Amino acid sequence: MSPTGLTGHRQTRDHAAVAVVCDKARQAFQKWRSLSVSERVRYLRKLRLYMVQHLEHLAEEICRDTGKVPVEAITADILTVLDALRHTEKHAVHVLSERSMPTPILLFGKKSYVEYQPRGVVLVISPWNYPLQLAVIPVISALAAGNSVILKPSEVTPGVGHLIEKLFFEAGFPQDVVQVVHGDGKTGAALVAQKPDYIFFTGSVSTGKKIQQEAAKHLIPTTLELGGKDPMIVCEDAPLERAVHGAIWGGITNSGQVCMSVERIYVHRSHYQSFVERLVEEVNKLQEGRDGDDDVGRMTSSAQIEIVREHVQEALDRGARMLAGRPPLEWEGERIPPIVLVDVTRDMKIMREETFGPVLPVMPFDSEEEAVRLANDSPYGLSASVWSRDLSRAKKLASRIEAGNVVINDVIITVANHHLPFGGIKESGIGRYHGSAGLQTFCHQKSVMVDRGRRSKEVNWYPYRGKFPLFKRLLQQYFGERTYWFGLVRSYLQLLRKSR
Ligand code: NAD
């Protein structure tokens, strides 16, 4: 028996077993939803404290399963989850509480409010690149909102999947409120077929499209957090030294296996040469393959190494030059040495498709117009960065970039601020999470209007006889160039008389 009560047969791809998990989730939902938000949030606090007590162990497990270096495990996976937990503990009660709304004057005498109600059973399907963060953050948001959750973590990082299961067990969540189902894409598809009330998916565009198609058959609402091909625009007035270091961290951290990593670098021609020289110099200083204090870890999956190999080889075959790193034939084992490519063209895979590896392809541009055109020339729209000392210029440029997130003079970090909604546009996804948006995503918004019930009829109820000219005058008095309050009240009173 596993910690959350899943027996072995339920971990199979068998649809019947998956159905049992969903039934249990439905039953658990009824009790869980009846708790107040502050009662639910107490479990999140326990989870946070348990995690803080076991930081070393968590980091070790993540590193073992993914090949990350420890600093990346503790910052990008663990810290982000702890911050999301604390943010939710602090804000969930307010964000999910009943919200009084204005009522228009023509609906005189009534009150309006919005209630946030849980959706039911939420299915979270997560990927392998940040296997803790990308699974746990949507799970805790859905839980705080009062849903029960089924999590299907990635089969590529099963150790972290089991670790997450243990974390929720140790935090003492009630039976079946969170269930972790281990398995591959077929298990994910079987869970989708169970018609959960909401699907929160993080992963590739191709799987996202499959899930959306299945969900559409039953009108199941979804959030899709998909891939990216993030551009970095380095203007002629950029803080160049910072931009070089930002490009390296943004493109190489987690061996480039980041949905928001720097995947395309566009540098103003006036700085192009010096930028590339500094980039190569600094990339060559990165440490890898020595010990736990390295800068660069190994790749997490061999399938991903093949994709990176294909993109780099195609670029080299078509005339790109490699100024740092080694060609694919010289790669060994699960490591890809950080690579700098120049003389790349916009039709190469390395500039069009998600590479998800430690590769920095650099291209010059001559004008801001050209930079925006190049940056937006992509089916993706997850994140981007703009580098300039002139912040008003940078903000204007940021507004023109087709992406759900843009960072000025930094990279990636919008995802680390839980006050900001996170998500992509175009093929990078549908919907937002994190912060208030992330809690409300997991709720039905119920709109309620209240009338004290003192009048026997409303003015627009039957009978209609003789009311049209009065309504016409009322509309002219209210919506015309000026509002004629006196006439408006008179028309309204006449309508009231006709409604007796
Ligand atoms: P993937 O699409 O292969 O798998 C993601 C998850 O979906 C896994 O748990 C997998 O088992 C499951 N799955 C596969 N087929 C399924 C199906 N038919 N039905 C239901 N579930 C199915 O993605 P991956 O390789 O694990 O992750 C890498 C991708 O994720 C990259 O494209 C990356 O950009 C993207 N990603 C996006 C974000 C974001 O926030 N936008 C964050 C991280 C990763």
Image (spheres, rainbow, N blue to C red):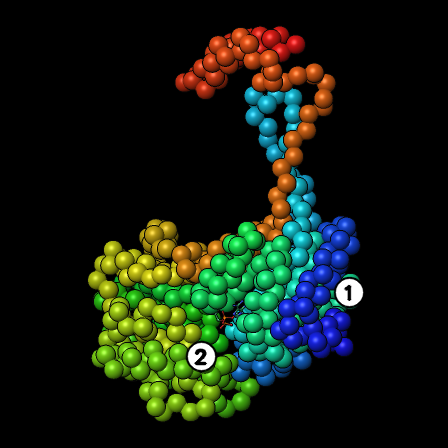
Q: Is any atom of residue 172 visible in this view?
A: yes
158 vs 32: above or below: below
Quarter of the image containing the C terminus? top right
Q: In which quarter of the view is residue 240 placed?
A: bottom left
Say above or below: 389 vs 307. Answer: above
Query: What residue is disc 1 on?
Result: 175
Horizontal and vertical percent for residue 41?
Answer: 72, 57
Image marks 1 and 2: residues in contact by CB distance under 8 Å:
no
- Residue pictured at 37% horizontal, 77% vertical: 359
Residue 435, by quadrant, is: bottom right
Residue 271 visible: no
For residue 278, which quarter of the picture?
bottom left
SS type, badge 2: helix
Give the crowd class for mark 1: few <14, some 14-19, many >=20 residues within 10 Å: some
Horizontally, is 241 left or right of 103 in the view? Answer: left
Q: Identify the residue position indicated by label 2 in the image.
A: 304
Q: Is mark 2 within 8 Å of ligand 1?
A: yes
Indicate the quadrant containing the N terminus: top left, top right, bottom left or bottom right.
bottom right
Front position in the image: 243 or 12: 12
Q: Amino acid at mark 1?
A: Gln
State the mark number for residue 79.
Answer: none
User: Does the Cβ of the disc 1 residue fall within 8 Å of ligand 1?
Assistant: no
- Where residue 367 appears, as percent x and y from the top left, is 23, 59
Q: Across the whole image, how many numbered discs are drawn on residues?
A: 2
